[in-house]
Amino acid sequence: MTDVYNFCAGPAMLPAQVMKKAQKELLNWDGLGTSVMEVSHRSSEFKKLAKQADQDLRELMSIPDNYHVLFMHGGGRAQFAAVVNNFLGSNGKALYLTSGQWSQAAAEEAIRLVGPKGVDTIDVTKNEVEPVVKSISIPDFNNMNDEYRYLHFCPNETVDGIEIFDDISSPWPIVADMSSNILSRQIDVSRYAVIYAGAQKNIGPSGLSIVIIRNDMLKLPKLPQASIFNYQMQVESGSMYNTPPTFAWYLAAEVFKWLKQNGGVAQIEENNYKKAELLYDCIDNSNLYVNDVAIENRSWMNVTFKLTKGTLETEFIEQAKNKGLVALKGHRLVGGMRASIYNAMPVKGVQALTKFMVEFEESNTNYSN
Amino acid sequence: MTDVYNFCAGPAMLPAQVMKKAQKELLNWDGLGTSVMEVSHRSSEFKKLAKQADQDLRELMSIPDNYHVLFMHGGGRAQFAAVVNNFLGSNGKALYLTSGQWSQAAAEEAIRLVGPKGVDTIDVTKNEVEPVVKSISIPDFNNMNDEYRYLHFCPNETVDGIEIFDDISSPWPIVADMSSNILSRQIDVSRYAVIYAGAQKNIGPSGLSIVIIRNDMLKLPKLPQASIFNYQMQVESGSMYNTPPTFAWYLAAEVFKWLKQNGGVAQIEENNYKKAELLYDCIDNSNLYVNDVAIENRSWMNVTFKLTKGTLETEFIEQAKNKGLVALKGHRLVGGMRASIYNAMPVKGVQALTKFMVEFEESNTNYSN
């Protein structure tokens, strides 16, 4: 069959090499004669896997020694609540920057948990009306006197196709939801107090979230919550306070190995830049496709675009699907198209998409002439 | 290689037929050219899977129409907290029956969340000292005047090898943690207000929990908690308030199909009875193996036993492993041996184990003579 390139925003495609290995050893992992998902998380074999995954992620992201790495249940939304419950006990207050759907959802969850008194929000989007351009403008926080337990932001908005590349500087600990851009480019972990990510974009299948947390954050006062999301308890038990999602953890470990074998984050950053450039160039050089995000805030991971002839969108999605280019429909809240091009998407997948986009535009221009 | 029979208490073995199918279609599910774990949970294909899984579980367990079925993140421990947070708002109080490690842990989590004032516990174990026999004695609740939002109990204790077969009758809604015996034998769902289960014993891989909840329970006052564990919100969104653990959900759906193809719960109940009988007979007919649970409370799922010559235990585990009989070591808190013989364990797996046990006893009796 034709190669299928899957542009789903999440659960997203995983590296082909990892999936082939997973298939090969699905019934007999590590010579045990059983699947990795049928093995005790407390077995020496699984503990070895867990240790390796921790080491590999630390190496890939240059995580300093005063940070812990947790492998937990749930995805980004589980962490929306966990962040609040782990850091906002005893009348704490947090600042949430909103830049799109996901940061907004995180702020809403915080308000649900501690009420509006515990949460300040700043909308950091700037919308020019004519022509419509969405951009981000980060205020200078260093002159603010407010006391916040943390500042929360989401550097990549999957629905809106907006990415914040600025290194935010703040007098408060910074908590970043990197669900959709973790491991996609080099970052300085030491600038963050907490980084969390749902796995289903750049790490593995859904049902797993990763938390990278600086030691001192464990001491903040907590609210009552499910113990499985208590960061201190999970640190003490090596992420095994309860039975973890072992198969997802295994796949994450394989994705880390794959990244290391392929030049690490520096190399994937180059690929990601190239893929995004290819796609945005294709859009900018066309009369049919249009993207409304300011160049400096265009996401490398989720490329959103609309067709100037809106009536062609269904046809576009249909024809793309017939060529093996699937899941290009934009999020139900915003419409249009979205090509999610996470780490696992090869350059040739994006080349196949841009080739199709050019041909589709040509055939439809000819048709209307 | 030799057939491997995996007696792990959880994550436990899955049906061989399901695992083979999962392997075959791991890279190309439903003709999509991608893995099921790379497909959007909101795609028509995945929604179809979700609907089928719901229907199949309803059919297998004869779930009445006034119950909802939820597929959620986490395992049993996630639900320990969710039960409290969904039902114990505004000064509610609950009664927890304790019969072993897991029911005790559930009660402890409830106390962590609402304090000791919100939780009463009754120890329903009865320990005869000479000879040591653990049994269960359920009080008559119908004469009690206390007002509880719910009564919580755990009908099968995986660590202790204790199962409660009685149909408990109570003036309060009954919440049952069936993590380790759901689908193992026929039960009358209408006797319960809520049944929950971590998947990793009789349903699928770890990272998924299933909740069967009666309509009226959704109206009880809630405590603040992560929205992903809010039963009302998950009912309204068809368990897709957030990205669910899709691969685990898919495997659960396949396990349900497998059960249906193999005679449903009535047939698996017969197999399970036969397996448990084989193993307990082997223990009772030996001088080397001993089980300390009263016959009427011996678990069909987790058969615990000790060796009267304790020094032989390491050797027993080692020799068993060499014969492909793996993960027989008892829980770290209680020691000894444990053979977990969930639905996926075939009768011939238990036959292989009892054959080995007889041979091991013979060779060690001869040796000591």
Image (spheres, coloured by chain):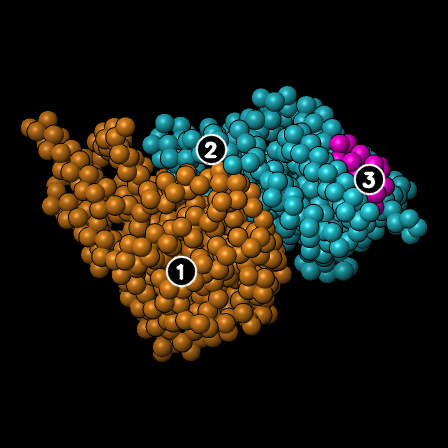
Chain colours: A cyan, B orange
Q: CA distance from mark 1 to mark 2?
A: 28 Å
Q: Which mark is residue A210?
A: none
Quadrant showing the N terminus of chain B: top left
Residue at image point 64% right, 49% down: A318
| Image position of B360 with respect to B53: above or below | above
Chain letter of disc 1? Answer: B
Q: Is residue A284 magenta?
A: yes
Q: Amino acid at mark 2?
A: Ala
Q: Which mark is residue A22?
A: 2
Residue A53 is situated, as x and y percent measured from the top left of the image, at 54, 30
Looking at the picture, do discs 1 and 3 lie on one chain? no
**Which residue position holds label 3?**
A286
Please report the residue visible at 19 percent of the width from the left and 46 percent of the height from the top: B279
Q: What quarter of the picture does the C terminus of chain B occupy?
A: top left
* Three-letter amino acid code of the residue under disc 1: Asp
Q: Residue at x 8, y 29 (%)?
A: B366
